[in-house]
C-alpha cells in the first residue's frame, strides 16, 4: 500500500474517531473545536501518541493544515527535536508528573519559532485505561518578548546604578572618624556646610 493511501486511511480513521468523540462527548468536542486556545487529542494506545484531532487555533498557531498534523507525534513541532531536557519535561507531562505544564520551544511550518506552554491530561475509558491524551498549548510568544524586554531594562538599570555608585565612591574619601565628600563641582563652596 502506498504511503499516500496509508496516510489517507489513517486520516479517515482519525476523522471517524473524532466523529465518535462528537457523539460521545458532544458539547466538549464542539468547544474544543471552536475555542481560541490551541487544542489536540492524541491516541494514547499507539506509539508516540499520534495526533487524531487538532482544532483551528492549533492549526493557525503552527501554520500546518489538519492533513499535515494528523497521525504525527506532537514532538514533530519541536524546534530542537533532540533537546533531551525538553523531551524529559514533555514525557513528564504525558505521565502526569507535572501539575503546572511545561514550556517548549516549537517551530511553525514557515520555520519561525515560538514558545508555548504545554498542558496534557489523560482521557480514560470506562475501565480507567488511558485511551487518549488531551493537550492544550498556550502561545507564550508575547510573554517571552516581554520577558526579554524586562531583562534588558533591568540590565540597563543595573548598569546605571553601578555607574552612579562608582561615581559616588570616587567622590567620597574616608578619613579616620569622618566622611568627607569631594566634589568636582566648583560651586560646592557656595552651598551651606550643613548640607555636606
Image (tube, rainbow, N blue to C red):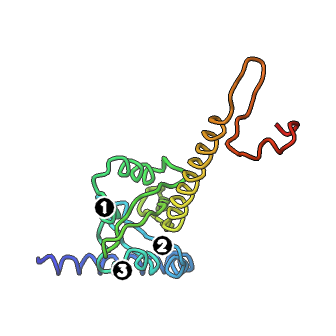
**Camera-nearest residue between 143 and 57:** 143
Q: Nearer the viewer, mark 2 or mark 3?
A: 2
Residue 146 x/y as whole percent = 55, 63
Q: 139 above or below 47?
A: below
Q: Secondary structure at mark 3?
A: helix
Residue 180, horizontal then vertical, whole percent:
75, 29
Residue in the picture at 23% in, 79% down: 9
Instruction: Locate residue 20 relative to residue 65 in the image: left or right.
Output: right
N-term-proximal mark, 2 vs 1: 2
Task: Name the disc covering residue 16, or none.
Answer: 3
Residue 191 occupies which quadrant of the picture?
A: top right
Q: Which callout, 1 or 3, points at the residue further toward the start of the chain?
A: 3
Query: Which structural element holds mark 1?
Result: loop
Quadrant of res 36: bottom right
Q: Nearer the viewer, residue 9 or 50?
A: 50
Q: Say if 155 sits above or below 135 in the image.
A: above
Find disc 1 in the rendering and name its residue. Answer: 46
Q: Say what secondary structure mark 2 lies in.
A: strand
Left of 100 or right of it: where is 46?
left
Query: From the viewer's perspective, is the residue at label 2 or at label 1 nearer?
Result: 2
**Mark 2 lies on residue:** 38
Tell whether label 3 touches label 1 (CB within 8 Å). no
Q: Is residue 170 above or below residue 140?
A: above
Amino acid at each position: 500500500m502506498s504511503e499516500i493511501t496509508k496516510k489517507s486511511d489513517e486520516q479517515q480513521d482519525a476523522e471517524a474517531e473524532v466523529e465518535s468523540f462528537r457523539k460521545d462527548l458532544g458539547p466538549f468536542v464542539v468547544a474544543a473545536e471552536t475555542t481560541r486556545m490551541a487544542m489536540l487529542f492524541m491516541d494514547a494506545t499507539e506509539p508516540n501518541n499520534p495526533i487524531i484531532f487538532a482544532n483551528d487555533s492549533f492549526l493557525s498557531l503552527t501554520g500546518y493544515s489538519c492533513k499535515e498534523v494528523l497521525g504525527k507525534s506532537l514532538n514533530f513541532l519541536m524546534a530542537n527535536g533532540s533537546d533531551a531536557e525538553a523531551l524529559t519535561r514533555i514525557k513528564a507531562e504525558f505521565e502526569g508528573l507535572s501539575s503546572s505544564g511545561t514550556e517548549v520551544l516549537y517551530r511553525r511550518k514557515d520555520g519561525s519559532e515560538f514558545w508555548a506552554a504545554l498542558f496534557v491530561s489523560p482521557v480514560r475509558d470506562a475501565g480507567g485505561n488511558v485511551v487518549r491524551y488531551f493537550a492544550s498549548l498556550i502561545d507564550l510568544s508575547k510573554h517571552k518578548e516581554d520577558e526579554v524586554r524586562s531583562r534588558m531594562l533591568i540590565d540597563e538599570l543595573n548598569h546605571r546604578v553601578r555607574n552612579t555608585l562608582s561615581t559616588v565612591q570616587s567622590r567620597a574619601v574616608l578619613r579616620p572618624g569622618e566622611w568627607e565628600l569631594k566634589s568636582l563641582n566648583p560651586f560646592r563652596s557656595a552651598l551651606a556646610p550643613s548640607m555636606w
